[in-house]
């Protein structure tokens, strides 16, 4: 460990003056190694593991965790795939690049929630058929739907039935919009 030069020490002292402690109790001022040895009548020894002053942890404001993503109920999925339950809207992401597809999907889901849609269809495509590879959107859309920033929009999702695109599409259940409480009527 290298020693601080006089200039570095002055800069360090100036920096320490600008820092506010986390609690009302200020940590004890560090004792200079030279002074400590002289006051006790013995030489100061350097410890490899100097104890750092413990500071109380600041209480963090906790935000409620976003709701969990769930699978669609079996009955709902079955009725959707048979055409007995209507699909409120659909978006086709074929041919879009990831960035555009992500922003299109997010905007689509927000509009669907505003309109009061319950179930929408998101078509991703199956991807290329070569060597068992999957399409990028086919892989990415489920990840996007599971992310915390979309959980206020999405209750759950599941692979669509064959009549709606099979593995190249997803049924997405939209979360009901929360009304602002205490709003003037």
Image (spheres, helix red, strand yellow):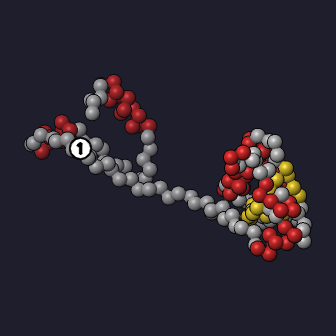
Q: Quadrant of residue 38?
A: top left
Q: Is residue 125 above or below residue 166?
A: above
Out of 8 and 178, give the one closest to the viewer. 178
Nearest the viewer among 43 and 77 is 77
Percent x, y of residue 167? 77, 58
Residue at 82 percent across and 46 percent down: it is 94
Residue in view at x 81 percent, y 42 percent: 95
Position of residue 157 measured from the top left corner of the image (x, y, whole percent)? 75, 62
Q: Label 1: how many residues lie within 10 Å, few (<14), some (14-19) or many (20+)?
A: few
Q: Is residue 34 above or below residue 83?
A: above
Tag count: 1
Q: Position of residue 18 (x, y in %)?
A: 44, 37
Q: Residue at x 71, y 59 (%)?
A: 151
> From the viewer's perspective, is residue 6 above or below residue 77?
above
Residue 14: where, in percent of width, then height? 39, 32
Can residue 179 be seen from the camera position used here? Answer: no
Quarter containing the C terminus:
bottom right
Q: Which residue is mark 1?
A: 48
Using the rendered view, name the quadrant where residue 90 is placed.
bottom right
Residue toward you, 1 or 44: 1
Quadrant in the picture for the N terminus: top left
State the SS at label 1. loop
On the question of residue 176 being in view, the answer is yes
Using residue 124 as the reference point, say whether residue 147 is left or right of it.
left
Q: Is residue 95 above or below residue 126?
A: above
């Amino acid at each position: 460990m290298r020693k601080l030069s006089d200039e570095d020490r002055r800069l360090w002292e100036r920096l320490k003056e600008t820092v506010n402690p986390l609690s009302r109790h200020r940590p004890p001022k560090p004792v200079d190694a030279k002074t400590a040895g002289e006051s006790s009548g013995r030489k100061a020894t350097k410890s490899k593991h100097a104890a750092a002053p413990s500071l109380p942890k600041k209480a963090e404001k906790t935000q409620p965790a976003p709701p969990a993503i769930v699978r669609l109920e079996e009955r709902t999925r079955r009725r959707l795939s048979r055409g007995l339950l209507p699909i409120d809207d659909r978006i086709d992401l074929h041919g879009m690049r990831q960035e555009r597809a992500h922003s299109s999907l997010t905007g689509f889901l927000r509009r669907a929630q505003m309109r009061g849609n319950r179930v929408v269809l998101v078509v991703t495509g199956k991807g290329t058929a070569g060597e068992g590879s999957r399409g990028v959107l086919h892989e990415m859309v489920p990840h996007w739907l599971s992310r915390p920033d979309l959980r206020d929009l999405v209750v759950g999702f599941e692979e669509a039935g064959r009549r709606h695109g099979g593995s190249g599409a997803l049924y997405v259940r939209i979360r009901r919009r929360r009304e602002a409480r205490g709003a003037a009527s």
